[in-house]
Image (cartoon, rainbow, N blue to C red):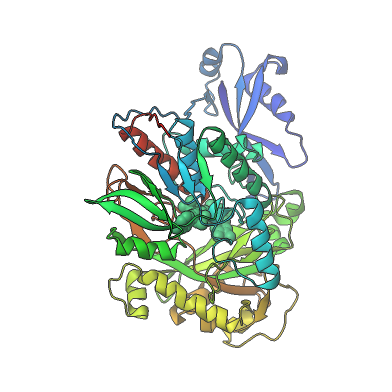
Amino acid sequence: MLQISQLKLKLEQSEKELYKLAAKTLKIKEEEIKKLIITKKSVDARKEEVCYVYQIEVMVDDEEKKAARLKNVNVTIAKRNAYQFKPTGDENLEKRPIIAGFGPAGLFCGLLLARHGYRPIIIERGEAVEKRVVSVEEFWKNGKLNTRSNVQFGEGGAGTFSDGKLNTMIKDQFGRNHFVLQVLAEHGAPEEILYLNKPHIGTDKLREVVKAIRQEIISLGGEVRFQTCLTDILMKEGRVTGIELEHKEVLECSVLVLALGHSARDTFKLLHEKGMNLTPKSFAIGLRMEHPQELISRNQYGSRYDKLPPADYKLTHNAVNGRGIYSFCMCPGGFVVNASSEEGHTAVNGMSNHGRNEKNANSALIVTVTPEDYFKETGMNNYPLAGVEFQRIWEAKAYERGKGAVPVQLYGDFKNNRVSNGFGAITPNLKGSYSLSNLRECLPDYVSAALIDGIENFERKIKGFSREEMILSGVETRTSSPIRMERDDGYEANIAGIYPCGEGAGYAGGITSAAVDGIKVFEAIASKYKYPIFTE
Ligand code: FAD
């Protein structure tokens, strides 16, 4: 195939026009194009004439000759970098591998183990997505939290109730990133995720996709057990020999993948007690901010904003107090959600449907905190789980100030350190109940100061960003894992046979990177153990 880049279409032009543009670029007739696929699509809003920019691949006769004759830097022979992996392990695996956690990391590790005949057993503390949706909706309606099945826990992991953004900062020369998108598309995600430069699925579609992946794993001989929590790890001479489930059942194993996510606080404690090497790491905390989506889109695209998908933004600033502040997990046209998982503690996050057609844009605005910060705040010097205790402090304050509901405040009142007494032109679009409060009391002062400095600075980039009536809610504490589970070059922890994986282990941040880490852990297992023949 020939790759052609930098083809531009006006907003009102049909994508069929790409045939005409490709033929013109290649100096051939349209009929000579046997196949055309879009491989990248982005919006160019830098000038008043906003347009879409495409990269495509076309199949024509004599491709190499044509490319050489044209001498056009935008026309090249397409390079395919399809993900491939061949298991080479030669050790016997006596028992089926177990994966704890069925978020993106566990899902992809499990799918690949299943596709290669390893028949994994996957355990997940939360519910299957059908039931989980009911538990989460109930929590948002009547405040009754199911601590085992919620926005953080259950099939699909923390990403199921999300915007489903799939862009990632990680580069992978082996094609794993694209492979993740392909698998999601094969299981019902929109095909456009394969070429959009900022692909997203939306919570509505993601719920169906995770279910379809589960069905493939089961059809290949894998097993998925929901409402089943790992409660203990059995060990002999420094290696895992099995796990305990729900404090009663024991499953033997010699390979255990821990894809627990960043909120498995009870399990982190268990791992610490078992002697696993856990290192405290920096993460970030802050608030979620809502703006009218129209304000964001107008700023980003100009007068033609209504002809384009809802715009996003990415903002960073170094505050005068030396703290870095940045926008995170921005959800165009979405909801703020009560994403709590512990009784008496409140944490928020954001999600959108595929259409991103809600009235408000929301994004976390967060400030980095280091182990030094949270050792000092908690008084737990060098305790690997001090970050968890630090998160709990602010989540408990948010719960208390909001009287169990999500505390919200107008930005103007946040600046002036007072409880809001009503809303202006914008009202919250929030899943769960909310209560007007003073969020300054739910964060360390240095975080509040950095947030105000950052929001004032972001006004220079997005006009209206710092208007006093904009809405803040809190607290945003589950941004990444507060620990890293150390692993060696073979991806094993200091307890042999245990494979830390995904975001909770500190090796990913987001859906795609967690899925990629799941794939890498599968590769590590399949490079050590051969295709097993289980008798049971
Ligand atoms: P998780 O997805 O957290 O999965 C871990 C699973 O392990 C959970 O289901 C949990 O129940 C289970 N588990 C924990 N302990 C045990 C145990 N002891 N026994 C059995 N099971 C256990 N990222 C993006 O890239 N794009 C987004 O748009 C986006 N939006 C988000 C919106 C929300 C509301 C949230 C909460 C997160 C969002 N994220 C987003 C982050 C993303 O969801 C995570 O980065 C990703 O899910 C991490 O994957 P993981 O598999 O490592 O862990």
In the rendered view, does 470 fall on the left or right side of 487? right
Q: Is residue 32 above or below residue 128?
A: above
Is residue 261 shown to the viewer in this render? no
Is residue 237 shown to the viewer in this render? yes
Q: Position of residue 418 (x, y in %)?
A: 60, 88
Q: Is residue 295 above or below residue 169?
A: below
Quadrant of the snapshot with the C terminus: top left
The foreground one among 266 and 168 is 266
Residue found at x 72% / y 51%: 355
In the rendered view, does 445 fall on the left or right side of 18? left
Residue found at x 46% / y 74%: 392
Q: Position of residue 212 (x, y in %)?
A: 62, 40
Q: Position of residue 182 (x, y in %)?
A: 56, 35
The foreground one among 313 and 233 is 233
Quadrant of the snapshot with the N terminus: top right
Q: Is residue 83 above or below residue 249?
A: above
Residue found at x 56% / y 47%: 166
Tally the marks.
0
The foreground one among 216 and 436 is 216
Please identify the quarter of the rendering in which residue 427 is found: bottom right
The foreground one among 327 and 278 is 278
Residue found at x 69% / y 29%: 18
In the rendered view, does 398 fall on the left or right side of 361? left
Q: Position of residue 469 (x, y in %)?
A: 68, 77
In the rendered view, does 30 fall on the left or right side of 168? right
Residue pushed farthest left? 237
